[in-house]
Image: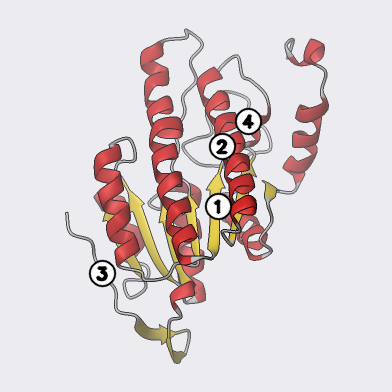
Amino acid sequence: MAALRLPVTFACNSNPCIMSPTNTVIIIGGSTGLGRQLALLYAERGCRVLISGRRTEKLQEVRSRFPERIACYPMDITDTETTSRTFDRMAEDSPEVGLIIVSAGTGELNPELNFGTDRPTLLTNVVGWTNIVNRAFNRLAAQGHGQLAVITSVGGLRGSGDAPAYNASKAYQMNYLEGLRQRACKSHAGICLTDIRPGLVDTAMAKGEGLFWVMPVEKTARQILHALDRKRETAVVTRRWRLMAFLLRHLPAAFYKRM
């Protein structure tokens, strides 16, 4: 499906402006949840925003909010061959990119340890995620600057008896990004890499009974925006989840396994 392409010149707030190429933002997984909210926030700022997602109708709904600033690219991240072509097309439509956000992810509770339940999580959060993150890193390295941000999770800090594949996949993402950060430093690639670790957010990803500290999407997205502006290497959002992240990291295994 052909992408909906945008002109580079448009109205920025109340004043005409010409977008700087570095004001282009690519969001993988920008049709729902945090990715959607971040797309809208960056469009409000006057950025050119390229979003991808599986459901065309959801992409179109986001684009309808800022049709002159947002372009849509249907993409299923688990289809790595198609994803690679689509991402390359997104890159071609933007000679220079300031920020790439990878917000695509999934996860299910799996108390029965059914592999069929875990398979989509692994295909999305590990296989598809790795493919797109590699392409994003190489794209920014080729231009010699830019920021790559990934949405991981506080859950990646420890294992989960209810959703072991999800937490393990987020731990994989955290470690993978750390490896890319080391690679960028050694190669002087000029890339800033940011690991965004949300706690529970009021999206379809928040599953289970008796959930606490479930944060509003807009509030969480604005704190992510602040962390990205500051080019933080790691940011736990929202702020109250920083305490939980600290406890998760330091709680002895003997206590944690009984929780």
Q: Quadrant of residue 63?
A: bottom left
SS at circle 3 = loop
The answer to which of 77 and 12 lies nearer the viewer is 77
Residue on which disc 3 sits: 5
Q: What amino acid type is highlighted by mark number 2? A: Tyr
Mark identifier at residue 155? 4
Q: Report how many numbered discs are placed on residues in the image.
A: 4
Which of discs 2 and 3 lies nearer the camera? The answer is 2
Direction bottom: furthest residue: 15
Which of discs 1 and 2 lies nearer the camera? The answer is 2
Residue on which disc 1 sits: 149
The tag earlier along the polypeptide, 4 or 3, is 3
Image side of residue 32 versus residue 60, left or right: right
Query: Where is residue 121 shown, x and y percent of the image?
Result: 43, 27
Q: Quadrant of residue 246?
A: top right
The answer to which of 191 and 252 lies nearer the viewer is 191
Query: Where is residue 93 shown, x and y percent of the image?
Result: 30, 67
In this rendering, is residue 63 above or below 68? above
Residue pictured at 47% horizontal, 89% vertical: 14
Mark-to-mark CA distance, 4 and 2: 16 Å
Residue pictured at 56% horizontal, 59% vertical: 189
Mark identifier at residue 164? none
The tag earlier along the polypeptide, 4 or 1, is 1
Query: Where is residue 69 shown, x and y percent of the image?
Result: 37, 73
Residue on which disc 2 sits: 176
Mark-to-mark CA distance, 3 and 1: 23 Å
